[in-house]
Structure formats: structure tokens, C-alpha cells
Image (spheres, helix red, strand yellow):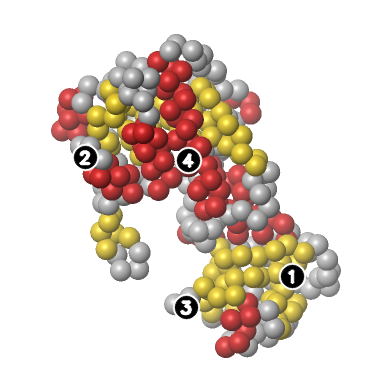
Amino acid sequence: MRIVFMGTPEFAVPSLQSLLDADPQSVGRVVGVVTQPDRPKGRGGVVSAPPVKVLAQKAGLPVLQPLKMKDESFLTSLKGWAPDLIAVTAFGRILPPAILDLPSKGCVNVHGSLLPKYRGAAPIQWAVINGETETGITTMLMDPGMDTGPMLLQETVPILPDENAGDLAAKLAPIGGRLLVRTITALNNVALKPIPQDRSRATMAPMLKKEDGALDWQLDAMALSNRIRGLTPWPGTYTHYGDERWLIWRAEPVSTGCAEASPGTILEAAKDVIRVAAGNGSLLLHEIQFSSGKRLTIRQYLAGHPVTVGAILTTSPHSSS
């Protein structure tokens, strides 16, 4: 069977690698890869290839990087590969009917949630933000909707209390690769019956923006902690101490000790502790990064930056007193 793989970020790399490592007699052969265009990356803005492209080139596979999915020259090239199946993991674009209808065995997607929960672009992040204790991988047959197609296989994974979205994605990615191979093998053996999703149980996981990282100290301490974990490493969560912007990397919810303080009030700032009042409970900050600085433990930060107890952290820069 001829397989075209579509994917872009690091999360998709294990899926492609698993297909390359699989037995071609039972799974098939990858004949080409589609990924997003090279883009500027990091503070230096150096144009870089997507991780999937790097692996594809290493494997000697042809690569297409269309700017638009309906581009005629791209569609002609894709049809020339004559795929029997298209495998998709975190590609980052919606596939038009011209692509969905191309392969005889359909398009199989690897999705980072237990569908029908968390359909959309950021399922791993939203599962953590919402305090879920488990998530997983679902493989599904794609249709024109947003992650609405019939499900094929699922595997459940616990979310540990101290895991952030980056940690969880790294754990889920290889599971996605293994499940993709199992799914295609079962489809080839006609041993897999697609299961329609229960639309009444569907929830959404919309794309995240940098503005989503602004911390609302009116939230309770656990919700703030989950939000920090869910938005790490991107887009990151932040608050302002006066005119100084703090990026919060790690924090811990505490259930006691601030009934009399306004949310955002710094309750403690000594040695290796900065504790901040939340809407309910308080939050211990463990690692922060100030504007144009590097990531620091609280002990490292306080060694060179005095912090005033009673100051109030805010969503935008202004006086902290």
C-alpha cells in the first residue's frame, strides 16, 4: 500500500518514524511527505525546516510544502504519488474534499485526545488546563468536519499532577506512532470497524493565542496551576510585577492562607518562596523568567531582585504597590 504522510511539528515525528520502521508487507510504504512551509524560528528569526521535513529528507523521501491546500500544482503532485492512504498527525491545516477523497482507503488522523472530547487544534493543552486526570490518543477516519470522523483505535494515558503540556505531548507522541501502525495494519486486514463519535459528548480545544497566557488571579489556585501547566512551554503564562513582566514556568497550588488578601497580592517573598493570593487559596511560584532575562528559580530571582510583600500582580504593567 502506498502511504502519504502529512505532519509538521515534533509531535508528528514519531508517527512518521513508526511508519518508516514498520513492516511494509503489513502496513505499506511511505511514498511522500507533505508538511508546512519553512518558517522563521526563535529570537533570531532563522528560517527553519519543520521537524517532519528534517526526518523525511533524512529518509530520502520527496517532500511537498504547499502554501495553500487547494493549489493546483500541489494537488497534481499529490495525485502523482497515487496514495492508497493518507496518514495525518498534527499537520496544522484542514484538508479539502479534493484530498480527503483521493486515497481509496481514506485519510487516517492521529489525534491527541480521547475523542469526542477535545476536538480541535490544542487538545493536549486544554486537557491539562481543564484539570483532566487522563487523556490519550485516538485514530480516526477523517471527514470534512473538525475531528468529527469515525474513530478507529484509542489508548488512554494518565495525566500526572506535575506534568505540563510539553511533557504530556512528549509522552503521547510515540504512543500515537504505535497506534497509527496498529490502525493501518488492522485496516489492511479488514479487522477494524469505524465507530461514529457521540456528538453529545463532544468538547472543543481551540487554537491558543499569546494573550491566553495572561494570568487572572481571580481564579482559584488549582485552576491557575493547571493553566500554567497547560500553557507551558507555549504560549506561556505571565503576570506583571509593576512594570516587570514575569513568565511563570512552574508553580504549586496551596489551599490555605489568604482569605483577607486581594487576588494577586504577594503574601510572601523570602529566600526561595514567592507566594501569591488567588481567588481561592494561594500559589507558590517555583520558576519565573523576567523580561529579556533567563529562566530562574525563585531563590535565584530573589538574590538579585527585591520583591515587596503586599504588592499586587496584574495582567498589564503598572504600579505594583
Q: Is residue 169 above or below residue 221?
A: above
Counting residues from the start of the chain, the first of labels 3 and 4 encountered is 4
Query: Residue at 57% across / 72% down in the picture?
Result: 288
Quadrant housing the C terminus: bottom right
Tell me the amino acid under the disc marked 2: Gly
Which residue is depicted at the point 81% across and 70% down?
A: 258
Q: Position of residue 199 (x, y in %)?
A: 59, 25
Q: Nearer the viewer, residue 109 or 181?
A: 181
Tell me the amino acid under the disc marked 4: Pro
Q: Earlier in the sequence, mark 1 or mark 3?
A: 1
* Mark 3 / mark 2, whichever is N-terminal: 2
What residue is shown with label 1?
277
Label 4: element kind: helix
| On screen, residue 145 above or below 300 | above
Measured in 3D between alpha carbons, the distance from the residue under mark 3 to the one under mark 4, in whole angstroms, is 33 Å
Quadrant of the image for the N terminus? Answer: top left
